[in-house]
Image (spheres, rainbow, N blue to C red):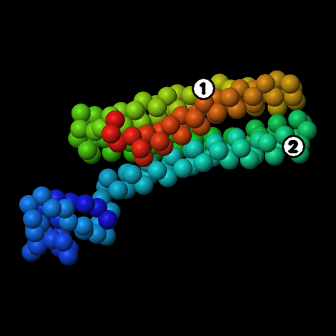
Amino acid sequence: MRLRRPECGLDASCGPRGSPRASGQLCLVPPSPVPTFASLLLFIHLAAAVVWVGGMVFAHVALRPAAVATLDPPQRLPLMTAALGRFFAWVVGAVVAILASGFGLIAATGGFRAVGGHVHVMTAVGLAMAVIFVGIRWRAYPRLVAAVADRDWPAGAAALGQVRRWVTVNLALGALTLAVATLGRGL
């Protein structure tokens, strides 16, 4: 439910046609059953963030440790290369969706002057994450692909280590963005 001022709909705490019973009183009104464009943008934004950050968590804390524990480099590195290749294709879409929906939401609310400081922080951190991803996807990952194709396991392990380090940074930035989005409205 959302809180609205006098223009709200009918509710037990509201007077006729949604007017408040007392000046400045808030009315509780159920949201409209028809999603607004901003609601659609927010859904796209959050779904894409879940894909990106959730995928990083899975790859970093589940897939890679399990692969290290059970597979030798000749099996582990091709698996990680293939898994990351599939994941990165999704992340490219997620980054585009996050940036487009985020800037769309900012525009729908009146631009950067109209939004709170937390939105400025989220934008800056999100752009930093996107730049880091570009470095991972188009610098470190091709080195991993080339090393695996050449069966050069030490070079592949080094490239995968570089991917892992930058994913760790992006994962921390993703957690920061989540904290700012949920706790930082007063910024």
Q: Is 68 located above or below residue 21 in the figure?
A: above
Q: Position of residue 156 (x, y in %)?
A: 81, 28
As drawn, the residue found furthest toward the front would be 22
Q: Position of residue 61 (x, y in %)?
A: 71, 44
Looking at numbered disc 1 in the image, what kind of residue is underneath it? Gly
Q: In this view, does 147 lie to the left or right of 135?
A: right
The residue at which mark 1 appears reads as 135
Q: In this view, does 186 lie to the left or right of 167?
A: left
Q: Quadrant of the rendered structure where residue 120 is?
A: top left
Sequence-wise, the earlier of marks 2 and 1 is 2
Q: In this view, does 39 lie to the left or right of 10?
A: right
Q: In this view, does 11 lie to the left or right of 19?
A: right
Mark 1 crowdedness (10 Å alpha carbons): few <14, some 14-19, many ≥20: some
Indicate the secondary structure of the residue bearing disc 2.
helix
- Whether residue 183 is visible to the viewer of this picture, yes or no, is yes
- Whether residue 86 is visible to the viewer of this picture, yes or no, is no
